[in-house]
Amino acid sequence: MKILMIAPDIFMIDRRILLEAESLIKKGHSVTLLSGFECRKEEHYTEKGISIHRYVYDWDDYRLKRIRKFLPPKDVIHRVVNRGFILFANRFLTLSPFERFIFEKANQFEFDIIHCHDLPVLKPAIVLSALRDVPLIYDAHELYPSQKVLPLRLRLRSYINERLYIKYADYVITVNDFIAELMRRRYGVENIDVIMNCTKVEDGFEPSHLRNILKERLKLKESDKIVLFQGWISPERNLDTIVRAFRYVGDNIKLVLIGYGPYEDKLREIVKKERLKKRVFFFGAVPSEEILRYSAGADIGIIPYEPIDENHLYCSPNKFFEFILCGIPVISNDLPFFRSMNERYGVGVTADMKRPLELAKSLRSVLEDNEKLNNLRENAKKAALELNWGVEEGKLYEIYDKIFEIHRRKREMKKKRFFYLPLLAMVGTYLACKGGPEMELSPNQNSYKVGDEIEIMIRYLPPSQPEVEFWVKRNPEPWVKIREYSKNPVIKYRFNKPGDYAFEAHIKDEKSPQGFRALWKGLYTVHQ
């Protein structure tokens, strides 16, 4: 059976996707994975039997290219037509230009089942499923519309799209029971199941043989205790509080951060200011296939996520399962998933991670009590017998065994509903796009390098197309005007110095007391 997987992952393909693909290949299926449509370069390669394709979106549209052939060669006319078409397509067409690009790439392949990962690729997958009359599995890795880091308009648009289109999927998979129950209530989904973010252990992996790797690499003492964080280093993960907590622990308790991200420089400043260089260590990035080897050297894993939104409240991150497979207990906030794991398996403790002193007390209560620590380790080893990919893999096979029968039953319903899909898309995206201008950076990344050039664009301006003025701020320097008021809503900007940047646009508005409306975008970290 030929399976087509579609995912929006740009920088790194989610481990969960690769594990699912490997398991399906092991079962005798062939898997083609289209992962990332805004990558730095186009790539086509095979990895562990998976045919992987990655693409670069040119921010254009094939329909628009045809229209431009009939236009006179004037930049002003082209700019007006381009902007008008993109605005129209994003609001009123079934597939936006970006979604149409995904559809075109996916439509080049032969497949018997579509397995789409996350909301950004759901609509193109639905259209492909309907046109080819093949089953569609929607794999929701998170509560996409509930991410506080996204602009309000994008969250609203995501909620409307997920609510409208999730019922076109023959089967829905998500990552834990809490999210599954929420989606069941919110969207009325019937065929939904849970495949947790467990990982697999390679043959011969024995955590007890790897206990000293981290200490040897960091030149720590045998008696030192390691608290390990691993993952993306970003502001919303509460890492500054974690670092400050190490003012209040003993000299033999160390924090090791494995990973990278735009917030690392800020954490290094805190370490320097608080004189914590002997207690806090930045290990850097580690290849995903080696992460378990280093995790095994920790004494306790820390997952500091705060419930800043539903997506964080109900999270069940990869790192939790990696810690468990290494026999490492976990300290976390008192969130539903971690609470349920602790009640069922006794693999960790919860702590108040908003206050450094309280967190330090919780860490010391575990790490300075050898009997308690050893009990938690034994519980983690027992839990690993159930919380591993071998168990979750069986659930995936069960879904694939029944997907064609479910598709046959839902086929007639979907044919009737598909007639209304363009109308619902038009109404939903129109409502979601209403509300005023929005600033957009392209390429939109968390971090950049000195010399990188970006394009800043103001979208959804009123038909009168008011004048726009652009400003930039490099902390701690003051705001600097980089362009006077102009009708052109687009400007290019090149980063010349490292630091944290923010952008602001002033849109002329006579009704506002200051004579303009301000849009703010930032912070973005620029490295040397």
Image (tube, helix red, strand yellow):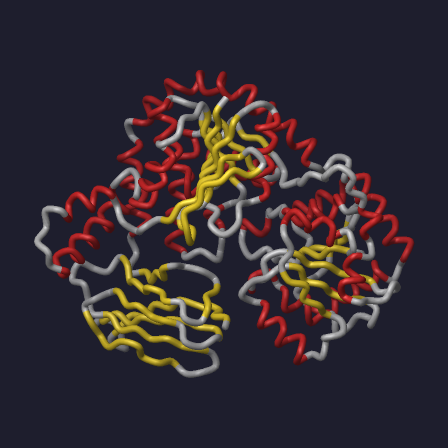
Position in image of residue 476 (x %, y %): 48, 81
The image shows residue 374, relative to residue 27, as above or below, that is below
Choose between 208 and 509: the one closer to the eye.
Answer: 208
Position in image of residue 2 (x %, y %): 48, 25
Position in image of residue 97 (x %, y %): 29, 45
385 on left or right of 39: right
Choose between 458 and 25: the one closer to the eye.
Answer: 25
Instruction: Name the image quarter holding residue 280.
Output: bottom right
Q: Residue at x 20, y 46 (%)?
A: 65
Q: Residue at x 59, y 68 (%)?
A: 264
Q: Residue at x 50, y 70 (%)?
A: 527
Choose between 36 and 316: the one closer to the eye.
Answer: 36
Choose between 103 and 205: the one closer to the eye.
Answer: 205
Residue lying furthest left = 72
Position in image of residue 149 (x %, y %): 48, 58
Q: Is residue 288 visible?
A: yes
Residue lying furthest front = 45
500 on left or right of 320: left
